[in-house]
Image: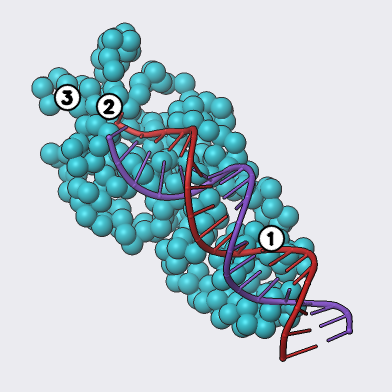
Chain colours: A cyan, B red, C purple
Amino acid sequence: MLRHTFLHLRGVGPRTEARFWREGVFTWDEALRHPLPWLGAWQREQARWELAESCRRLALGDALYFQGLLPAGERWRLLADFLPQAVCLDIETTGLYWGANVITVIGLYDGCQYRAFVRGRDLHLFPEAVRRYRLVITYNGQRFDLPFIEAEMGPVLSGLAHLDLMYVLRRLGLRGGLKRVEQVTGLARPSALQGLSGYHALVLWRLHRSGHRGALDTLVRYNAEDVVGLLPLAVLAYNLMAAELPLPLSPLPLPERPDLPLPYDPSLVEWLLEREEEAV
DNA sequence: GGGGCTATTTACGGCTTTCT
DNA sequence: AGAAAGCCGTAAATAGCCCC
């Protein structure tokens, strides 16, 4: 999709990009050979330089370059080109406020493997593990997960591009939290942990700290179910957005939600769901 | 080369939203 | 509670273009 993108050029907005496509200019290569008469002389020169630079950056796998030039609602365009180097991320914390609360679990899922980094166990290994990727996928990570990680660990994600699915899905009319969006799109999978919310993540961590066996497993399992759901959601969003454009793009295959062989404590889940009403 | 018209981008304010 | 992006409407700045 990136090769079909012109929105990142200086002075080119949605309408001018549509003009490229309307005139039959669909890729960077075509644009470099085309006289581009609808641009002024100055803009045309600028565009040629930027197109050549775009080819170079894409060959280098420089996702960060394009992320800086694309509006947040258009970052979904990165997905197809960077899917092999993408990783989904979701954190659990002791509360909502970075600075006052801390990270308890960070989950990563790259389409093959899920891995959890747990406070007091191997959380310190997270920076090195995540640096192998080029694109991070989150839900509302722009305002929650990333600031938390930055506050606690420093700029460990500064070298990676970031796709926050919340903004794309909103443009598609899919509003609400992650779990609601999964329901509406039919991507949710029946699970014993279905009724749990972020608040329960906080309770599970407290139980774990006070010695409850099975609480940590349940928390990690909760995190895993959230984070593996991000990938099909990202692909769905990509396909829906791509389908709206007048381009010959083939949809990406929707990844299956993997079976998670992770243990959890069923009676603990039941207990948490029972007392959901009393808590706030 | 200047005046004015059009299309497009950019800037701004106020409101809404989501994360554990 | 806290931040920042989208959205919506409005307004201003910019570029291209045509005509004289």
User: Spatial distance from mark 2 to mark 1, Cα to Cα?
Assistant: 45 Å
Query: Can you see residue A20?
Result: yes
The chain carrying label 3 is: A
Residue A178 higher or lower than A140, as above or below? above
Percent position of residue A223, x then y? 33, 32
In terms of secondary structure, where does tag 2 sit? helix
Percent position of residue B6, x then y? 78, 64
At label 3, the amino acid type is Arg
For the point 36% across and 44% down, the residue is A143
The chain carrying label 1 is: A
Looking at the image, is mark 2 or mark 3 earlier in the sequence?
A: 2
Q: Say which of A225 and A93 sits in front.
A: A93
Q: Mark 2 or mark 1: which is in front?
A: 1
At label 1, the amino acid type is Arg
**Residues marked 2 and 1 touching at CB (< 8 Å):** no
Query: Would you say A198 lies left or right of A174 here?
Result: left
Residue A46 higher or lower than A261, as above or below? below
**How many discs mark residues in the rendered view?**
3
Q: Say which of A100 and A112 sits in front.
A: A100
Q: Mark 1 or mark 3: which is in front?
A: 1
Mark 2 lies on residue: A201
Mark 3 lies on residue: A206
